[in-house]
């Protein structure tokens, strides 16, 4: 989507606030001993109270209001009444939703309770790399160069990136042009970020794996070798300078 009016910007700000609020409150609500289904249903109630509709449900018929991925699950984890959260789990919550015809996407990984498995450095790296990437995005910048930046920063921190999960355009639907904003340098990708366009940028930072593989449930993506991945995501509007980070108002990362 390319923004053409203050009305459109206001609509995007409203849905971005809704997904940010939902993500923040879900993280605060999650406790060891809860199931991921309990956390997801809580998130569903928040979205409903805010008048927003779950984007994965609307778009794909996903069996949950949000995606909750735990430990070596990378993305699209199905909330389950049989998956009980434990102290030290690496948890990722991804909230995307629609409100009044506008769409936004916000995600973040965190350690539940005490960091007994030393996941926090990975979480911190994913968060900081996204911040760095966002600070470099503006109209005219090559998408491949931002991917290369993310990959390079991950390597410097001792990590890798997941190469088959990407950021994307958003605004009037969940996935729009540009359909792929990778976390690595792709020399064949000649596309550039366009001023006033709306995109969801995300970092998938991995301890070892470079690919995520679909599990038999048909939704969940996980690493084959059991390595861990932390993801962070913001929806932004691209400008000639620093982007407008639409989902920052209720950011859970500080």
Image (spheres, rainbow, N blue to C red):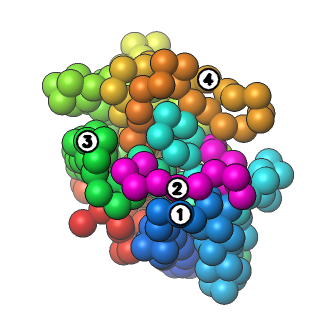
Q: How far apart are marks 1 and 4 (CA)?
A: 27 Å
Q: Which of marks 1 and 2 is nearer the N terminus?
A: 1
**Residue 5 spot, x, y in % from top left:** 53, 72
Q: Distance between the residues labelled 3 and 1?
A: 20 Å
Write down the residue under mark 4: 213
Helix, strand or loop for disc 1: loop
**Residue 23 spot, x, y in % from top left:** 49, 67
Which residue sits at x=77%, y=51%?
Answer: 62
**In the image: residue 9, left or right of residue 62:** left
Q: Residue furthest toward the right?
A: 61
Which residue sits at x=24%, y=66%?
Answer: 254
**Residue 130 spot, x, y in % from top left:** 31, 45
Magenta highlight on residue 81: yes
- Magenta part of the chain: 76-89
Magenta highlight on residue 59: no
Write down the residue under mark 1: 33
Q: How far apart are marks 1 and 2 (CA)?
A: 5 Å
**Is 17 in front, or is 62?**
62
Say which quarter of the image contains residue 183. top left
Choose mark 1 or mark 4, whichever is in front.
Answer: 1
Q: Which of marks 4 and 3 is nearer the N terminus?
A: 3
Which residue sits at x=61%, y=71%?
Answer: 43
**Is 226 in front, or is 63?**
226
Label annotation for residue 85: 2
Say which quarter of the image contains residue 236. bottom left
Q: Earlier in the sequence, mark 1 or mark 4?
A: 1
101 w.r.t. 62: above or below: below
Write down the residue under mark 3: 118
40 w.r.t. 78: above or below: below
**In the image: residue 10, left or right of residue 53:** left
């Amino acid at each position: 989507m390319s923004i053409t009016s203050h009305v459109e910007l206001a609509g995007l700000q409203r849905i971005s606030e809704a997904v940010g609020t939902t993500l923040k409150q879900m993280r605060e609500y999650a406790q060891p001993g809860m199931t991921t289904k309990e956390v997801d249903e809580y998130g569903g109630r928040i979205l409903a109270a805010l008048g927003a509709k779950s984007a994965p449900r609307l778009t794909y018929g996903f069996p949950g209001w949000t995606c909750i991925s735990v430990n070596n699950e990378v993305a699209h984890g199905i909330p389950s009444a049989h998956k009980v959260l434990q102290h030290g789990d690496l948890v990722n919550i991804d909230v995307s939703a629609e409100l009044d015809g506008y769409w936004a996407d916000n995600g973040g990984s965190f350690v539940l309770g005490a960091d007994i498995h030393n996941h926090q450095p990975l979480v911190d790296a994913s968060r900081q790399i996204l911040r760095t990437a966002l600070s470099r995005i503006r109209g005219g910048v090559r998408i491949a160069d931002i991917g290369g930046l993310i990959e390079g920063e991950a390597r410097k921190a001792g990590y890798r990136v997941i190469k088959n999960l990407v950021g994307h355009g958003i605004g009037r639907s969940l996935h729009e042009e540009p359909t792929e904003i990778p976390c690595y340098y792709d020399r064949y990708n000649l596309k550039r970020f366009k001023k006033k366009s709306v995109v969801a940028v995300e970092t998938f930072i991995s301890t070892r794996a470079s690919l995520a593989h679909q599990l038999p449930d048909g939704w969940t993506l996980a690493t084959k070798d059991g390595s861990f991945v932390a993801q962070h995501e913001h929806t932004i509007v691209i400008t000639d300078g620093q982007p407008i980070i639409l989902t920052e108002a209720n950011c859970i990362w500080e």
